[in-house]
C-alpha cells in the first residue's frame, strides 16, 4: 500500500510520464536485483542530493537511493464506476495505492484528440473525481447493507452504521470523503481502513504542459488547476511529460544544462517523486561505508530499533544502541572520525526517534 497511482483521462500524458518513471527505474535497476519488473509498476529512486554529498566524503563503490512505487492506472473514463471501459477493475487498483498522482492535460495540440472534445482541466478533474466518489458510494452502500444486519447483535456495528449513514449522505451529494466533517471519528477511521475510500486519498495534480509554456511559465490551464488545488489543499507540480522522458536518459550535468536552457530550475518529475515521498509519510536515514552509501526508507516518527529492521530483522531483535550523527554535522566535519573526536557522534537507545538524514550505525547482539 505504499505506492502512488497515476490516474487521468486518456491522452493527458499518463503513459509518457509513466515511461519516464520506468526509465528512471531502469537506470538504477542494477542496484535493485531483488525487485521484479512489472509492466504497470515502476520502482523509482527518490532523488536526494545529500547522497552525493556523503559519497564525496566516503567515496563508496555505489550509491543507493530510497525508492517508491508508481502504478500506471490507465483506462479511467467518464462512467468507469458504472463499468464503462474496464472501469471497476481500475478503480480497485486505485484502492491499493496510498497517494494519487492525477495527471491533467494543460497543453493544446490539435493532433492529439481529447476524449471530451476540448482541453478543460477543471472539467477533466471533476470527471475523474466524480468517478472516485461514485465508486465510494457503491462500496459504502454494500457496507451499510452488511452493517444493518450486524447492528442488531453488535454495538460496534451499530455505531459504525450511524457514521456510515452520515458519510453516505455526505458523499451522496457528490462531495469527496476527504471533506466529511468527522474524519477523526474512530468509527469512521475503522470504516476507512477497511474500504480505503478513493476520494479520501491524498492527491498531487500533475499539470502536463507543452514545451513552450514550461519555459515562459504562463499557461492559463495551469492557473485553473492551481486555483482548484488551493481550494482543496492539494499540490500541483507543473511538468512537460515529453521533456521529462528525454531528461531521464541524460547525465546529471547534461540534464541541468538542458533544464537551464529551458529556463527551468528543477525537473518536474523529480518534484513529483519528492512530493509523493513526503505525502506517503516517508523519510530517509543513511548508512555510509566504503561498500555503499545508502538511503533507507522509513515512516516519519520511527524509533531506532524499527528503523534498523528495514536493514535486517536481526538488527531490531538484537538492538543494543544506535550510533547517530546528524547529516549537517557529518558533512560539516568531513565524516565520522572528526565527528567522533568532537563528540558529535551520539549513542542513542531504543526510544530514539530517527531524524531525516541521520547517519546511523546499529550495535546489536546476534
Ligand atoms: P495517456 O493516454 O494519458 O497515457 O497519454 P499519453 O502519454 O499516451 O500521451 C498522449 C499523447 O500526448 C501522446 O501523443 C504524447 O506524445 C502527447 N503528449 C504527452 N505529453 C505531452 C506534452 O507534454 N506536450 C505535448 N505537446 N504532447 C504531449
Image (spheres, rainbow, N blue to C red):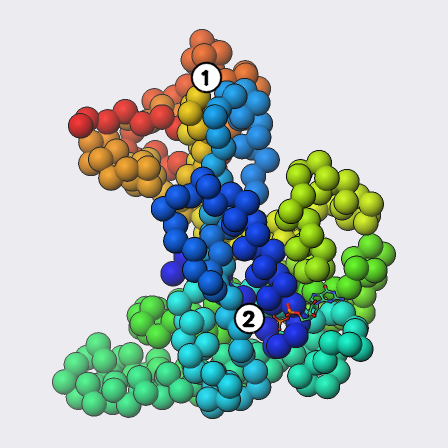
| Image position of 319 (left or right of 179) | left
Foreground of the two, 336 or 200: 336
| Image position of 347 (left or right of 212) | left
| Image position of 283 (left or right of 108) | left
* Residue 168: image location, x then y, percent: 41, 86
Q: Residue at x 25, y 87 (%)?
A: 146
Foreground of the two, 219 or 342: 219
Whether residue 330 is visible:
no
* Residue 213: image location, x then y, percent: 82, 61
Q: In what quadrant of the picture does the C terminus appear?
A: top left
Q: In what quadrant of the picture does the N terminus appear?
A: bottom left
Report the residue marked by disc 1: 336
Q: Mark 1 or 2 closer to N-term?
A: 2
Q: Quadrant of ligand 1?
A: bottom right
| Image position of 79 (left or right of 253) | left
- As drawn, 71 above or below 339: below
Q: Residue at x 37, y 37 (%)?
A: 353
Report the residue marked by disc 2: 7
Q: Residue at x 82, y 54 (%)?
A: 215
How many badges with numbers are in the image?
A: 2
Label 1, residues with CA under 10 Å away: few <14, some 14-19, many ≥20: many
- As drawn, 322 above or below 306: above
Name the front one of labels 1 and 2: 2
Q: Quadrant of residue 56?
A: top right
Find the distance from the CA under tag 1 to the CA under tag 2: 44 Å
- As drawn, 287 above or below 189: above
- As drawn, 148 above or below 51: below
Amino acid at each position: 500500500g505504499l505506492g502512488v497511482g497515476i490516474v487521468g483521462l486518456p491522452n493527458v500524458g499518463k503513459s509518457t510520464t509513466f515511461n519516464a518513471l520506468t526509465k528512471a527505474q531502469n537506470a538504477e535497476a542494477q542496484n535493485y536485483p531483488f525487485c521484479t519488473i512489472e509492466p504497470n509498476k515502476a520502482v523509482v529512486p527518490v532523488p536526494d542530493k545529500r547522497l552525493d554529498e556523503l559519497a564525496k566524503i566516503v567515496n563508496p563503490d555505489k550509491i543507493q537511493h530510497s525508492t517508491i512505487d508508481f502504478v500506471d492506472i490507465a483506462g479511467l473514463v467518464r462512467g468507469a464506476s458504472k463499468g464503462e471501459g474496464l472501469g471497476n477493475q481500475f478503480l480497485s487498483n486505485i484502492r491499493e495505492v496510498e497517494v494519487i498522482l492525477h495527471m491533467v492535460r494543460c497543453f493544446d495540440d490539435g493532433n492529439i484528440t481529447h476524449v471530451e472534445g476540448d482541453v478543460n482541466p477543471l472539467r477533466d478533474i471533476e470527471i475523474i473525481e466524480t468517478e472516485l466518489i461514485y465508486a465510494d458510494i457503491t462500496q459504502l452502500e454494500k457496507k451499510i447493507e452488511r452493517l444493518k444486519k450486524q447492528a442488531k447483535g453488535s454495538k460496534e456495528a451499530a455505531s459504525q452504521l450511524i457514521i456510515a449513514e452520515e458519510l453516505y449522505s455526505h458523499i451522496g451529494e457528490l462531495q469527496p470523503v476527504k471533506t466529511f466533517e468527522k474524519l477523526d471519528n474512530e468509527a469512521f477511521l475503522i470504516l476507512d481502513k477497511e474500504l480505503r475510500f478513493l476520494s479520501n486519498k491524498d492527491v498531487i495534480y500533475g499539470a502536463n504542459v507543452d514545451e513552450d509554456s514550461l519555459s515562459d511559465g504562463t499557461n492559463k490551464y495551469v492557473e485553473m488547476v492551481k486555483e482548484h488545488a488551493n481550494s482543496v489543499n492539494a499540490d500541483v507540480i507543473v511538468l512537460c511529460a515529453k521533456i521529462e522522458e528525454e531528461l531521464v536518459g541524460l547525465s546529471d550535468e547534461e540534464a541541468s544544462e538542458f533544464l537551464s536552457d529551458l529556463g527551468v530550475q528543477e525537473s518536474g518529475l523529480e518534484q513529483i517523486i519528492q512530493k509523493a515521498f513526503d505525502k506517503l509519510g516517508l523519510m530517509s536515514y543513511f548508512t555510509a561505508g566504503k561498500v555503499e552509501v545508502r538511503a533507507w526508507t522509513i515512516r516519519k516518527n520511527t524509533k531506532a530499533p524499527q528503523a534498523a529492521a528495514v536493514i535486517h530483522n536481526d538488527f531490531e531483535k538484537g538492538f543494543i544502541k544506535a550510533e547517530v550523527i546528524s547529516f549537517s554535522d557529518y558533512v560539516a566535519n568531513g565524516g565520522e572520525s572528526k565527528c567522533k573526536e568532537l563528540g558529535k557522534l551520539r549513542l542513542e537507545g531504543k526510544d530514539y526517534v530517527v531524524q531525516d538524514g541521520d547517519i546511523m550505525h546499529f550495535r546489536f547482539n546476534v
